[in-house]
Amino acid sequence: MRADIITVRRRAQKMGSVSGRRQRACLADRRPGKAGKEEMLMLSCTLLIVLLAALCAAGDEPPGMSVNFGREDMVIKSGWRPLLRYRHANVPFKPYVQELFTPAGTNILRDAPEDHLHHHALMFALGVNGASFWAETPACGKQMHLHLGTPEKNPDDRTPTDGLTHTLRWRTAEGVSVLEERRAIRAMYEAEHNATLLFWESTLTAIEGLDEVVLTGSHYYGLGMRFVESMDKDGAFLYAGDAPGEIVRGDERLTPGPWCAYTGVAEGRRVTVAMFDHPDNPRYPALWFTMQTPFAYLSATRNLWKEPMPLMPGEPVHFRHAIAVWDGAKDAATIAAMNERLLALWR
């Protein structure tokens, strides 16, 4: 009996000891020091999350305009968005804009297609004294690189300065220099109309000592643009006037006007591109060369095939154009509004 009582007491003491330890543990959990540490830990985690979110948001903020020169090309970006790529080196006959992007990043230009290897995306070429600088055969002339530079701010307009200047010497196959060109390529993202804008300016000066320098060429010579292959199908031209102009051959037309546009599908997306003529250009407005069969092409021309243009010594000739590229199909009213926007930038 006594042994049983002792056993019960020992069990009770043991249970009491366990209960006491549990109570002390519970009391320890309620100590202000530990609660404060947990609160501080939670606060620190919250602050860390907020800081990381802020850093991520800051990382999404794009930088401003940038112009990046490579050995063979120059790329203009607006933030992370590429606007264009200009090929200035390793070009056998002429430099050109190799890629031109919509705000969503879709390129619309095609370079050196098999059917016409001399069609280099967006290019400027004419005839001079009967020599072709458009085609690329052994008998054709070349636009020879002299030097690159950066554009200066023009006090007479509000166009961007992000881009390059490219000085070229136009030389015939016989090695005769006939022209010097100072070319300026600039670009910007136009937020109001959600469009990419490219500005192309070419100043042509006759080389001194020549008996004459005359600009000539076929009906499509000028600032010409070849589109990606998918845009050749189911595309449509838009004109500033009421109707397209005269037919030269097939579906090739020459239509006068301050602008001309084309809409088609590139990379599975509908896009629109428009070219605009500066009102101070010689023989304004341009004659827009357009064709759709067997491929689509757009060129700003000066009627040189019918009226050659003599260049006087010491009297440079300036050609200025702008090109706008949108995502989606745009109507004539939208393009006309962009023309007004450009007139405001040009003046």
Image (tube, helix red, strand yellow):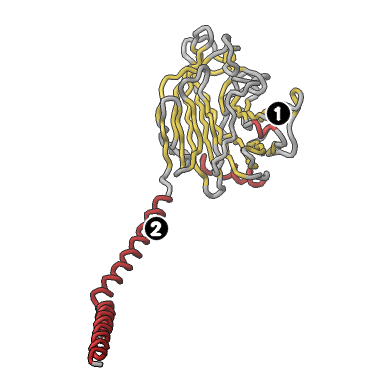
Does label 1 or label 2 sit earlier along the sequence?
A: 2
- Name the quarter where the N terminus is drawn: bottom left
Q: Residue at x 74, y 34 (%)?
A: 244
Q: How many marks?
A: 2
Q: Residue at x 67, y 22 (%)?
A: 219
Residue, disc 1: 291
Residue 275 placement, left or right of 56: right
What's under tag 1, amino acid-wise? Answer: Met
Query: Mark 1 falls on what kind of element?
Result: strand
Q: Quadrant of residue 150?
A: top left
Measured as percent of width and height from the top left, residue 73 is found at: 45, 28
Is 25 drawn above or below residue 346 in the view shown? below
Is 30 drawn above or below residue 322 in the view shown? below
Q: Nearer the viewer, residue 159 or 88?
A: 88
Residue, disc 2: 53
Q: Nearer the viewer, residue 97 or 154?
A: 97
- Mark 1 to mark 2 CA distance (whole Å): 52 Å
**Residue count near mark 2 (Cα–Cα under 10 Å), binned few <14, some 14–19, many ≥20:** few
Q: Nearer the viewer, mark 1 or mark 2?
A: 2
Q: Residue at x 53, y 44 (%)?
A: 344
What's under tag 2, amino acid-wise? Answer: Ala
Query: Mark 2 falls on what kind of element?
Result: helix
